[in-house]
Image (cartoon, rainbow, N blue to C red):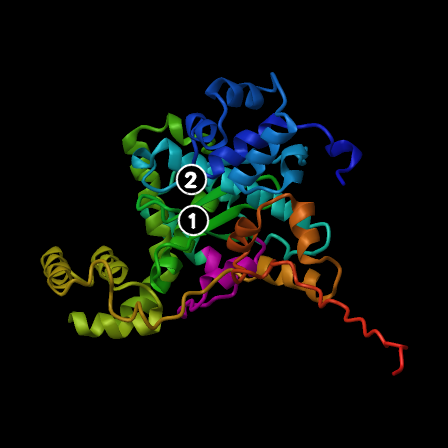
Amino acid sequence: MLNNDEQQFNPKRLKEARLTRGLTISDLAKKIGVSKQAISQFELGESVPKPETMMNLINTLRFPKTFFYREYKEQFVGNTFFRAFATVSKKSKEMQFNKSMLAGYIYQYLENYIEFPQLNLPDITKYSNGEWDENSIEELATLVRDHWDLGDKPITNLVNVIERNGLMLFSVDVESEKVDAFCQHRKGRPFIFLGNDKQSAARRQFDAAHELGHVLMHKDIHNQDVLTRDEFKRMENQANQFASALLLPAKAFSDTVTSTSLLHFIELKKYWHVSISAMLYRSLRLGILDEGKYISLMKQMSMKKMRIREPLDDVMPIHEPTVLKRSVNMLLTAKIKSELQIIHEMGVPQDYIEMLCSLDEGTLNTKEVEPTIKLVINNTTK
């Protein structure tokens, strides 16, 4: 049964569900056997789907019925930072943005039951002019390490460190070569989305650090669409510089580079948990390598086919976000909620809850109840 405030069809939810599944109005119309005009009218609130049409929409889009009748608490979403923004298709951006809205609904639901870690970011008001150069980015990385008591040692699991300090991390299938990860400034606490598609622990470390850089440095940029190509490129370079400085602190990293052979950087990858490519570029920026040696090492990587898949990528564990996963499992283990209740009350499809919360596939499958076996005693005697 729907609650009294969930009896009315909400046209906004239909558009969200369609865009999340990557469908155009025409695509959806063909799938359920109605006209494009009908879908447009549903999404504009000019008409309401008949019960049979509604069931077709639910089955085609694979969203719980409750989703289409829900008025969620408003989400205050700032800019969404997509890497390679200029080349990411509109369809891909819409899909990822609407997945982020589902993440917001999940968070809103869970915060009613779970006390998440407090947001703990350093005070960066002295950088309020927003002008980031190489020196101020290095200072910021050091400030973050000091604030989070990380010293100058390798960060073996940055995902855990970020979660521990109150940012919300979600896993997401980005389904695009142009998107590795993205983040959003939100009221309360920032959201960071890490792509599941690129299976590399070192790459995930760098992605997490890059998005943290955006969170800290680019809060006042409210709309990427108004940036010129050069402005966007500069912003991405700043986030990359921050990630390098955070993961590879200048003096500590320099002290470990005792050789400039490719084999040595492979060994350093085990220690710093950072990709060989990122370490080579950091070495160039710090003056450990000159440009000729850097180009030579990168050519060696290309010849050995190490640019796409580096050594150790198949053995280093890929760290998953755990806060949301533990939250859902706590509700289930303590029998506060059943699997069906979580899906129904969130109003979010099972596959997206499991993906965004890093849950094992099938975690929210409805558990079958063993049938009661009745034994009948035959009173007839022969």
Position in image of residue 231 (x %, y %) = 32, 33
Quarter of the figure with residue 1: top right
Position in image of residue 141 (x %, y %) = 42, 55
Seen from the viewer's position, the closer of residues 375 and 96 is: 375
**Residue 380 drawn above or below residue 162:** below
Q: Which residues are magenta?
A: 143-166
Position in image of residue 301 (x %, y %) = 15, 63
Position in image of residue 89 (x %, y %) = 34, 34
Q: Residues within 10 Å of mark 1 (few under 14, many from 20)?
A: many
Q: Residues within 10 Å of mark 2 (few under 14, many from 20)?
A: many
Q: Please say whether residue 249 is visible from this viewpoint.
A: no
Q: Is residue 18 left or right of residue 316?
A: right
Q: Which residue is located at x 25 percent, y 69 percent?
A: 311
Q: Is residue 19 left or right of residue 257?
A: right
Asked whether 145 falls inside the magenta stretch, the response is yes
Q: Is residue 210 left or right of residue 104?
A: left
Quarter of the figure with residue 41: top right
Residue at numbered disc 1: 211
Q: Which residue is located at x 51 percent, y 54 percent?
A: 355
Residue at numbered disc 2: 81
Q: Which residue is located at x 12 percent, y 57 percent?
A: 295
Q: Quadrant of the C terminus?
A: bottom right
